[in-house]
Image (cartoon, grey):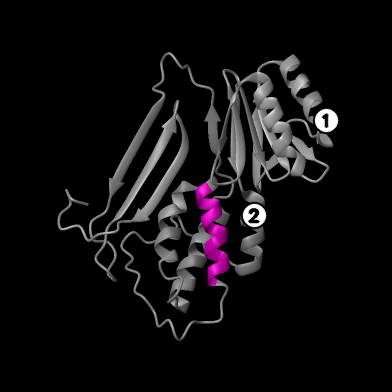
Amino acid sequence: MVCIKQASIGISCAITLFSHMIHASRNWSQNHAYTIYLIKFVLIVHVDDLLGGCNSDPFYKGLIQHFKKTVKIQEKGIPTQMLQMKLDWNLALSIVSTSQERQIMQLYIKYVGLENKKMFDSPMDPKLKIIKGDPNNLPEVEYLNLIGALYFIARMSRPDVYYAVNALSRMNACYTMEHWRYLLRVLIYLYHTKDQHLTYRRADIDKTKPVTIYGDSSFVDDPNNGRSTSGNVCYYYGNPVSWQCEQQIYVALSTSEA
């Protein structure tokens, strides 16, 4: 991991020059991260942090020397934290695990408290029907702040709470104290399962499918508008790399249509 020590205005220039030097392609993604692709090399830039992977020490050292010509950087070694995620490495087995224990703990202390004794074995009651409240009579709780924090956790390392957070986010403009308690249940569940990690393993590319996608949907699960919810997860060489859960735009008239 590398940390930029100078104003990051030079990053774009450095990457552009390096891209031309090695004739690599450059992609600009929605989260403002550059990615340069080679056969066995990847470099990701997020604001002032660079995360790279390479199977060639000489190539890596050449890259660092190239960047030092343009910006001041500090080498951090193998990263243990990235975007509030903890990274646990087992280089011998080619395994890395991600978790967000620290952020979950901070949220739990702030919104629940360590004195709480309640425990839940699921983030949400599967039979729960969430009914809209009065948008003109919102309780004084940090509903939107907690929704945003839980969405980040669900999106980055905890897909098991994605549906619950997505369903409760539909109440952002009409939440009640009851909805707030449902949201705290998600946080309590996360706290008591905070040691669960997403683990990524190097796959045998000759025996593993490159891309596998699973998808499913509910049928008329929202009592407020009659819409259904779709979900999917994408695996890249056996490792989950993307997952989504969103309410459908139209009202499905049958399970097949949903």
- Location of residue 167 in the rendering, given as x and y in whole percent from the top left corner: 39, 62
Residue 250 shown left or right of residue 47 in the figure: left
Element at label 2: helix
Q: Amino acid at mark 1?
A: Lys
| Residue, disc 2 | 103
- Location of residue 86 in the rendering, given as x and y in whole percent from the top left corner: 66, 42
Indicate the quadrant where residue 232 lies.
top left
What residue range appears in magenta?
Answer: 143-155
Above or below for 137 versus 143: below
Residue 242 shown left or right of residue 84 in the figure: left
Query: Which mark is drawn over residue 68?
Result: 1
Element at label 1: helix
Above or below for 44 versus 231: above
Query: Which mark is drawn over residue 16?
Result: none
Please report the residue visible at 64 percent of the width from the left and 54 percent of the height from the top.
103
Residue situated in front as seen by the camera: 63 or 243: 63
Is the residue marked by circle 2 packed among few (<14), some (14-19), or many (20+) residues within 10 Å? Answer: some
Please report the residue visible at 30 percent of the width from the left and 56 percent of the height from the top.
248
- Location of residue 52 in the rendering, given as x and y in whole percent from the top left corner: 67, 29
